[in-house]
């Protein structure tokens, strides 16, 4: 659907993006991850044609992106603003019309979204009268009013209370089911795990990883397994002996425990199960994949350390 | 273009619904009307009827002063000395506005004193001087010559040298009309300045509250810039039209209701008087009858149609020229408060245009005035002055040349400004320096 190819961008002497390429498939939620200042916002601005890349191309469904394609994109920037003196309804109408909707279409869409997000009471209110959360909701609605096929959201959950975060998540999942492509730039790794299918990680202007969420987590797994059992903890420890290392444990009560174990030497999951069978009653055992938070830190941190050493 | 119009419509609505717009739309023209009213009422004379006591201890004037009495001055004679303090404080003199002291030596030293309570208008001063001088002439002719009074006055007639422009021998233009042009120039200046600052504020506000990023995902920077200029410019024109309407109705009502007979020749007593007199006094009287001249000027001599047409044309071109500059500057600022130092030179340039208008008023044919007339920074004000003074025969094309130069400059400025705007609008948090401007200007 959206193909980013060899994008380079420098601001005078400072390199903002170096040869960044990845692909976003139709109907998927794609996470664009990276620490602050990595170049995500620059890339998003390039996709939105707000700034121009120095080299590289962006294709939509195989064709080079043009000015007209902007109408297919809904964009919610991280640092977003509204005209404070406009009324909610007029503001939404104005932005929808800039995206090419007729007045009538825009009004119909506004009615639908204002109903859905329970915003009808604020229609005639000026933006300056609203709370931050309300304004965030309006910004989200303005980004999706023209029914874009690609949605680019930069930190869409910031400023929302948990109820509204859930509302936005559900809406994004509905979009996904409707076949829309969503690019999500966020620092909230939990939501990446929850709703993203694939992700790319940019650090220091470069793409350092990309793939499906499970692939990314898989790639960073470090031989940790979890075992839930019933029995004596001492018997469990004795059984492990030298081939394994206990990382931590949770006491579940009723002589039941959940323990995370790291493999040592060449020990395998099967070895672990063999030594435990007969010593404790195993209820469940599984491989523990790192969270996206861990993946993120693991990918970004080494580079930082190297930087510090320089 | 559709996007620019949408942006323009939004800006227009925001401007015309703002409190400051509504206030300025009414307070502005009402102030102009109030000043006009004051000029009409008090511009000529501070007090129209004067009582003057003439202290003539030697009876030099023989209790006579003017053959044809002037209704506006009532003379009384006292054949004794009147001390200034006495005149000032004594009850019997309180009804008099001035004391004219007749000194026996006046025939030789030609010096006289008039003591007043409230300063008389130039018109009144001229009248008193004229009456006194005429009476003295009669006495002098009688005492020192064998001539008849008529012959004496023929001889005495001073030489009246009138300086005329070779291209305008009829003297159709006048300084006063030039001032009217300057007034129009000031209005252009005020409008460009006020709405230029509005553009600047609007751009920096969009930038600081980051709505600009949402907008730029839908419209090109140039569309945004042009839309903004059009929207705010239309609001300015609407405001100007409100001004014209209110001032027009006000002037009409003033003529019909408040000053119905001011244009009536019978009331031009000062001028009537002047017809009888001659020479310098006549000139003085003509000048002194300022209020009448002003009314005549406003109602009969200004070609409002021409002035307003060119005003609007030059305002639009000048507005785009300066507006683009203001917008470019706003877009390059790092924060709303930053870059004020770059606004100051722009304001200085705007003030230069005012000075240029003033300069052209006094030195219309000067080479520098010619330069100011074509220079896009100053031409909107200078052309107004020149237009009201009148172009020389066969030189009317100059105004079109100036207009074309201004329009082309405005287009060039728009191109340069949109480059600065495009490169500067998404730069935040920096301290604006000249090198930024140069860098952004170079970058395509």
Image (tube, rainbow, N blue to C red):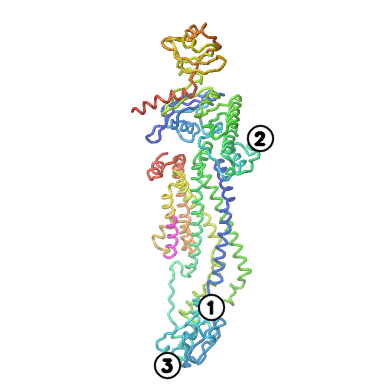
Q: Residue A305 appears at what percent x and percent y?
A: 38, 26
Q: Residue B181 appears at what percent x and percent y?
A: 49, 62
CB contact under 8 Å: marks 1 and 3: no
A249 vs B371, nearest the viewer: A249
Tell me, yes or no, whether dots 3 and 2 are on the same chain: no
Q: Which residue matches tag 2?
A: A115
Q: Quadrant of the C terminus of chain B?
A: top left
Q: Chain of mark 3?
A: B
Disc 1 versus disc 3: distance between alpha carbons?
Answer: 31 Å
Q: Quadrant of the N terminus of chain B?
A: top right
Disc 3 versus disc 2: distance between alpha carbons?
Answer: 107 Å
In the rendered image, residue B181 lying in the magenta stretch gets the answer no
CB contact under 8 Å: marks 3 and 2: no
Visible residue check, residue B399: yes
Q: First in sequence, mark 1 or 3: give its number.
A: 3
Visible residue check, residue B414: no
Q: Residues within 10 Å of mark 1 (few under 14, many from 20)?
A: many
Q: Which mark is residue B373?
A: none
Q: Secondary structure beneath disc 2?
A: helix
Q: Which residue matches tag 1?
A: B270
In the rendered image, residue B360 lying in the magenta stretch gets the answer yes
Q: Residue furthest left?
A: A310
Disc 2 vs disc 1: which is toward the camera? 2
A50 vs B155, nearest the viewer: A50
Q: Quadrant of residue B68?
A: bottom right
B73 vs A155, nearest the viewer: A155
State the extent of the magenta-drawn residues as a range.
B349-362
């Amino acid at each position: 659907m959206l193909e980013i190819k060899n994008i380079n961008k420098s601001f005078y002497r400072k390199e903002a993006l170096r040869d960044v390429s990845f692909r976003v498939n139709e109907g998927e939620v794609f996470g664009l991850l990276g620490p602050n200042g990595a170049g995500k916002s620059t890339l998003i601005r390039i996709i939105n044609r707000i700034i121009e890349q120095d080299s590289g191309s962006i294709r939509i469904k195989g064709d080079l992106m043009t000015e007209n394609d902007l109408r297919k994109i809904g964009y919610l920037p991280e640092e977003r603003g509204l005209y404070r003196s406009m009324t909610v309804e007029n503001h939404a109408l104005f932005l929808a019309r800039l995206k090419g909707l007729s007045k009538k279409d825009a009004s119909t869409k506004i009615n639908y979204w204002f109903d859905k997000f329970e915003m009808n009471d604020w229609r005639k209110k000026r933006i300056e009268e609203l709370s931050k959360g309300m304004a965030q909701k309006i910004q989200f609605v303005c980004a999706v009013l023209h029914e874009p096929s690609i949605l680019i959201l930069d930190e869409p959950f910031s400023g929302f209370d948990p109820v509204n975060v859930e509302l936005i998540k559900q809406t994004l999942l509905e979009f996904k089911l409707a076949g829309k492509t969503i690019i999500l730039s966020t620092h909230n790794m939990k939501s990446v795990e929850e709703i993203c299918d694939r992700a790319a990680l940019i650090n220091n202007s470069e793409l350092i990883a990309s793939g499906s969420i499970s692939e990314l987590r898989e790639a960073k797994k470090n031989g940790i397994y979890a075992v839930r059992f019933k029995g004596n903890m001492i018997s469990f420890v004795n059984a492990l002996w030298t081939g394994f290392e206990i990382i931590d444990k949770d006491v579940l009560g009723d002589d039941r425990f959940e323990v995370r174990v790291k493999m040592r030497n060449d020990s395998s999951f099967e070895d672990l199960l063999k030594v435990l069978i007969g010593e404790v009653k195993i209820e469940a055992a599984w491989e523990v994949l790192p969270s996206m938070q861990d993946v993120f830190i693991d990918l970004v941190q080494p580079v930082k350390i190297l930087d510090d050493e320089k | 273009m559709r996007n620019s119009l949408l942006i323009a419509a939004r800006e227009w609505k925001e401007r015309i619904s703002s409190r400051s717009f509504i206030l300025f739309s009414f307070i502005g023209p009402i102030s102009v009307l109030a000043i006009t009213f004051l000029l009409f009422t008090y511009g000529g004379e501070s007090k129209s009827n004067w009582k003057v006591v003439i202290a003539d201890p030697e009876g030099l004037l023989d209790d006579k002063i003017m053959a044809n009495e002037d209704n506006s001055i009532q003379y009384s004679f006292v054949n004794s000395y009147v001390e200034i303090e006495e005149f000032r404080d004594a009850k019997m003199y309180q009804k008099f506005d001035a004391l004219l002291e007749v000194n026996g030596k006046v025939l030789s030293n030609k010096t006289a004193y008039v003591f007043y309570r409230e300063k008389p208008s130039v018109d009144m001063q001229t009248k008193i001087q004229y009456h006194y001088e005429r009476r003295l002439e009669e006495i002098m002719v009688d005492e020192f010559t064998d001539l008849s009074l008529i012959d004496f006055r023929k001889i005495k007639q001073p030489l009246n040298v009138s300086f005329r422009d070779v291209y305008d021998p009829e003297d159709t233009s006048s300084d006063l009309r030039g001032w009217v042009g300057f007034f129009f120039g000031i209005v252009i200046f005020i409008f460009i300045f006020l709405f230029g600052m509005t553009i600047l504020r609007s751009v920096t506000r969009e930038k600081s509250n980051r709505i600009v990023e949402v907008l730029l995902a839908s419209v090109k920077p140039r569309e945004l810039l042009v839309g903004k200029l059009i929207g705010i410019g239309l609001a300015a024109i609407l405001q100007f039209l409100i001004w014209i309407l209110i001032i027009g109705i006000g002037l009409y009502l003033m003529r019909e209701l408040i000053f119905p007979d001011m244009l009536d020749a019978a009331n031009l007593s000062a001028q009537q008087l002047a017809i009888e007199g001659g020479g310098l006094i006549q000139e003085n009287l003509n000048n002194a009858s300022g209020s009448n001249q002003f009314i005549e000027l406003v109602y009969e001599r200004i070609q409002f149609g021409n002035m307003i047409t060119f005003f609007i044309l030059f305002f639009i071109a000048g507005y785009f020229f300066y507006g683009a500059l203001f917008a470019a500057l706003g877009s390059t600022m790092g924060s709303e408060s930053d870059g004020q130092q770059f606004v100051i030179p722009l304001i200085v340039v705007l003030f230069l245009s005012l000075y240029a208008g003033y300069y052209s008023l006094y030195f219309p044919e000067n080479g520098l005035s010619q330069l100011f007339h074509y220079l896009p920074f100053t031409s909107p004000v200078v052309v107004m002055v020149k237009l009201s003074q009148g172009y020389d025969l066969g030189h009317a094309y100059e105004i079109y040349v100036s207009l074309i130069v201004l329009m082309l400059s405005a287009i060039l400025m728009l191109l340069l400004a949109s480059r600065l705007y495009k490169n500067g609008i998404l730069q935040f948090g920096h301290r604006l320096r000249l090198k930024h401007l140069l860098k952004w200007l170079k970058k395509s």
